[in-house]
Amino acid sequence: MKREPEIVRLLMQLGADARKGVHPHRDATTALTIARERGYDEIVAIIEEEEQRRRETISGATTTNTAQDDLSEFIANGGDA
């Protein structure tokens, strides 16, 4: 909320999930959604970079953001396209 890139990076490195929001408006209240809506491009970039780093660490291989993000969003929405 305060637009502090260093804190965002630290939180992401410590395992924060920028795609979890607050009930009952989970989708609208995720850190990633708020950063995108407010035009915090540097925050969005950090979140995406750290998510990519996690995927690479887990899989041991490089994957594209788009495919994994689309799948994660599909699952998070209960399979609704």
Image: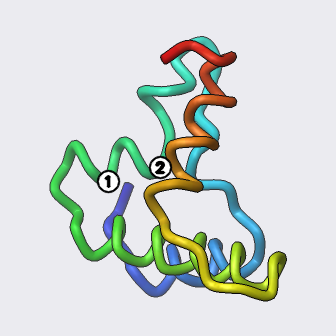
Find residue 13 and report its image quarter.
Answer: bottom right
The x and y percentages for residue 69 are: 53, 51
Which residue corresponds to the image point at 32% horizontal and 53% vertical from the top-left? 35
Amino acid type of disc 1? Ala
Horizontal placement of 18 versus 31: left or right? right
Horizontal placement of 47 versus 44: left or right? right
Which residue corresponds to the image point at 38% horizontal and 42% vertical from the top-left? 33
The x and y percentages for residue 24 are: 60, 12
Q: Measured along the vertical axis of the image, is residue 15 above or below residue 46?
A: above
Residue position for label 2: 31
Q: Total label count?
A: 2
Nearest to the observer: residue 78 or residue 21: 78
Q: 10 Å neighbourhood of mark 1: few (<14), some, or many (≥20)? A: many
Find residue 62 and report its image quarter.
Answer: bottom right
What element does badge 1 sit on?
helix
Amino acid type of disc 2? Ala
How far apart are the alpha carbons under marks 2 and 1? 6 Å
Q: Give the quadrant of the N terminus.
A: bottom left
Contact (Cβ within 8 Å) of mark 2 with mark 1:
yes
Residue position for label 1: 35
Which residue corresponds to the image point at 51% horizontal and 54% vertical from the top-left? 67
Q: 10 Å neighbourhood of mark 2: few (<14), some, or many (≥20)? A: many
Find residue 52 and report its image quarter.
Answer: bottom right
